[in-house]
């Protein structure tokens, strides 16, 4: 299982109460006030960590609290501050307030952190109320409560290029041959259930880009058919989309219709996805039917210049590789 969305309840620590106390010593009947201040409650902090793969930690434990500050004590001893609660989240985590849906923060880089909830202030001890007119104050204040709220954490994969296609189009095969990643390939639909990110190296240009493979989309995904559109969030942040079409038309599919349906599913999920730069790639060139389908595709979408490849035979990959890099520069 891959956990990419979960609701959590978080609470910062309460401040410790201030103390009321007076110095009592032999031969010193009227010692001054010496009640210390309460310690501050611990904060709740988020920290992005590249070693955390998904949000499973928050799926299995949904309540997280920072420690309370300690109360002040006599002899002018201030209470200790509460230990903060530091939540390690995967890169690409988006945090929304559960009730309003408002986006609070996004953590995209390793070790980036965010102070989500502040701990309550500690109360004042009576020593701090001493003044020229009041030498024996009996006042002190209580610590403030730490803030608490419900949040929704959502993981959105970070990659330069996002693969979009119907099941079995060959998305995972393509990622396998282009990158260092090795997602599972099989001849049945919905082989890929978890997003995988691979790195494509360009040694000649001294650079690399990343590509995300996500589960296949089907018609009506926006209405939650198939695996639904839930995982489209994993291409939301990609700079370029790669539409991968099965040009062989396996299982009586029509790649031209496929392309239109993919665009429609994207638009139904989020209009902004349609405005992203994209490339169209026809796969399975090695199959007999591919050529005729590609001719039809070119006629039907004259403005698009599709790439024509065979992922398994690793044919036609070089121009595609170069084009992706060009898009990203
Ligand atoms: N003939 C031919 N078959 C291919 C090619 N690329 C992939 N396939 C086959 O198509 C099937 C599906 O490939 P996958 O890479 O698993 O497809 P996918 O798009 O990742 O599928 P899902 O993860 O289920 O969405 C496998 O049997 C592959 O061997 C190709 O270029 N030519
Ligand atoms: Mg796959």
Image (tube, rainbow, N blue to C red):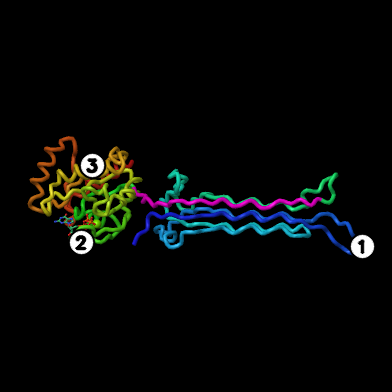
Cα separation between marks 2 and 3: 26 Å
Which quarter of the picture shows residue 328?
top left
Report if the beta carbon of the residue with label 2 is closer than 8 angstroms to ligand 1: yes
How many C-alpha atoms fall within 10 Å of the one at disc 1: few (<14), some, or many (≥20)? few
Q: What stretch is highlighted in magenta?
A: 137-159
Q: Name the front one of labels 2 and 3.
A: 3
Instruction: Locate residue 69 relative to residue 301 in the image: left or right.
Output: right
Q: Which residue is more in the foreground, 327 or 171?
A: 171
Quadrant housing the C terminus: top left
Find disc 2 in the rendering and name its residue: 186
Instruction: Locate residue 171 relative to residue 152 in the image: left or right.
Output: left
Q: Is mark 1 on a helix, strand or loop?
A: loop
Earlier residue among tags 2 and 1: 1
Instruction: Locate residue 295 relative to residue 17 in the image: left or right.
Output: left
Question: Residue placed at 20% from the left, 46% from the top?
Answer: 281
Q: In this view, does 14 lie above or below 256?
A: below
Q: Is residue 98 above or below residue 81?
A: above
How many C-alpha atoms fall within 10 Å of the one at disc 2: few (<14), some, or many (≥20)? few
Give the image quadrant in which the ligand numbered 2 is located: bottom left
**Disc 2 to disc 1: CB gap under 8 Å:** no
Q: Is mark 3 on a helix, strand or loop?
A: helix
Earlier residue among tags 1 and 3: 1
Find disc 3 in the rendering and name its residue: 264
Find disc 1 in the rendering and name its residue: 27
Instruction: Locate residue 290 relative to residue 220 in the image: left or right.
Output: left
User: Residue 19's spot in the image, x, y percent?
Assistant: 74, 56
In the image, residue 147 lies in the stretch drawn in magenta: yes
Report if the beta carbon of the residue with label 1 is closer than 8 angstroms to ligand 2: no
Quadrant housing the N terminus: bottom left
Q: What element carries label 2?
A: loop
């Amino acid at each position: 299982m891959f956990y990419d969305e979960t609701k959590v309840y978080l609470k910062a620590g309460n401040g410790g109460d201030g103390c009321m106390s007076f110095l009592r010593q032999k031969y010193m009947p009227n010692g001054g006030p010496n009640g210390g201040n309460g310690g501050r409650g611990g904060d709740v902090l988020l920290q992005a960590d590249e070693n955390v793969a998904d949000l499973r930690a928050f799926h299995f434990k949904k309540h997280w609290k920072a420690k309370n500050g300690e109360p002040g004590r006599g002899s002018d001893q201030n209470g200790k501050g509460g230990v903060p609660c530091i939540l390690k989240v995967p890169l690409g985590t988006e945090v929304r307030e559960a009730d309003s849906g408002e986006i609070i923060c996004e953590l995209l880089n390793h070790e980036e952190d965010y102070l989500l909830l502040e701990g309550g202030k500690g109360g004042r001890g009576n020593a701090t109320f001493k003044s020229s007119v009041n030498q024996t104050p009996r006042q002190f204040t209580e610590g403030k409560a730490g803030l608490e709220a419900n949040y929704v954490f959502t993981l959105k994969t970070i990659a330069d290029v996002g693969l979009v296609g119907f099941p079995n189009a060959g998305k995972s095969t393509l990622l396998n041959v282009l990158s260092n990643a090795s997602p599972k390939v099989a001849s049945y639909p919905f082989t890929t259930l978890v997003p995988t990110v691979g790195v494509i190296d360009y040694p000649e240009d001294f650079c690399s880009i990343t590509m995300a493979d996500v589960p296949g989309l089907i018609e009506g995904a926006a209405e939650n058919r198939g695996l639904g559109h839930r995982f489209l969030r994993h291409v939301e942040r990609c700079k370029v989309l790669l539409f991968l079409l099965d040009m062989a038309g396996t299982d009586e599919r029509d790649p031209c219709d496929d392309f239109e349906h993919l665009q429609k599913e994207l638009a139904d999920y989020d209009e902004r996805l349609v405005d992203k730069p994209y490339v169209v790639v026809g796969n399975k060139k090695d199959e007999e039917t591919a050529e005729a389908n590609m001719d039809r595709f070119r006629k039907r979408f004259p403005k698009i210049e599709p790439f024509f490849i065979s992922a398994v035979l690793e044919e036609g990959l070089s121009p595609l590789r170069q084009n992706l890099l060009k898009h990203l520069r």
